[in-house]
Image: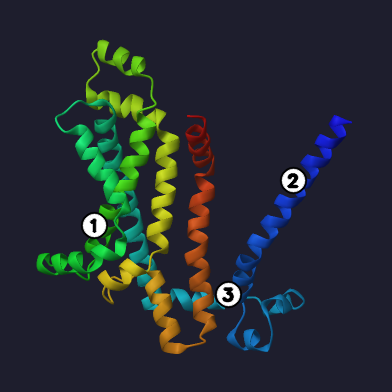
Amino acid sequence: MNAIRRGMSNGLVQAFLVVTGLVWLTPLAGLLVSSLRSAQDTAKGGWWTALASPGQLSFDNYTALLKNAGMTQALWNTVLISVPATFLVVTLAALAAYAFAWLDFPGRESVFLIVVALLVVPVQIGLLPVAKLFGQLGLFGTIPGVVLFHVAYGLPFAVFLLRNYFAEIPKEMLEAARMDGGTEWRIFVQLVLPVGRPALASLAIFQFLWVWNDMLVALLFADSSSQPLTVQLQSQIRQFGSNIDVLAPGAFISLVVPLVVFFAFQRHFVQGVMAGSVK
């Protein structure tokens, strides 16, 4: 009887997850179908009508999108912003987290408390002061300026997350490595980073998704030559209104890239979440 109940329970859970997945994927499927239809076909009916007339679907919109200099430049700008901002945050946070977790230096706890306190500072508070500072430094309206802003505001959470993870590494493991003659740098690279790979992957996913989907920071700090895809899509809506043949493929590309990144690192992400819950 218990086996039957467990089987029914597992079946209900699986059915619920399947239904939830289908509901979650429906907007994505609709956006994909819309991106493959012409503006004329889209005006005639909803995206689901194309399922009965697959002849409407083509890659002409994507071909036109790749020929649109503004959209392709915005896509490239998004990559130039997201990848360095993610790499720098993960790298710098890992170094700082190891120092806060395992190195003794004057004021360690006080500095870490300051880092934790920065978590409560809203992004909106720093927009205008940082914009003024970047203007004086010649960084306002540039890709490096946008990257630096994302790095600065991404580091407090990243350091806090990785420090707590690194602190759970058995102390005996590090002491054994030091007794074998390992330097702090070698211990960090060959021991701490491999052990902390799940947490690093989880942090990289969160940071990449935040930067890739950001529009507020880019809207203020990026000019017309350095604006990412989110700002370009918003500009297309404002300028042309209902140019769905440009907006749909651009929005789908903007959405599908984070999905690809998430599923590519899904295994490490789950390991990091499970490890954090166990600890």
Any part of residue 88 in sight = no
Residue 83 seen in render: yes
Q: Amino acid at mark 1?
A: Leu
Q: Tags 1 and 3 in contact by the CB under 8 Å rule?
A: no
Sooner in the amino-acid sequence: mark 1 or mark 3: 3
- Quadrant hosting residue 32: bottom right
Which badge, 1 or 2, is on the more N-terminal residue? 2
Mark 3 highlights which residue? 35
Residue occupied by mark 1: 148
Indicate the amino acid at tag 2.
Answer: Val
- Total numbered badges shown on the rendered structure: 3
Q: Position of residue 159 (x, y in %)?
A: 31, 41
Q: Nearer the viewer, residue 232 or 221?
A: 221
Residue located beneath label 2 in the image: 13
Upstream in sequence: badge 2 or badge 3: 2
Q: Where in the figure is residue 194, as x and y percent of width and height?
A: 39, 29
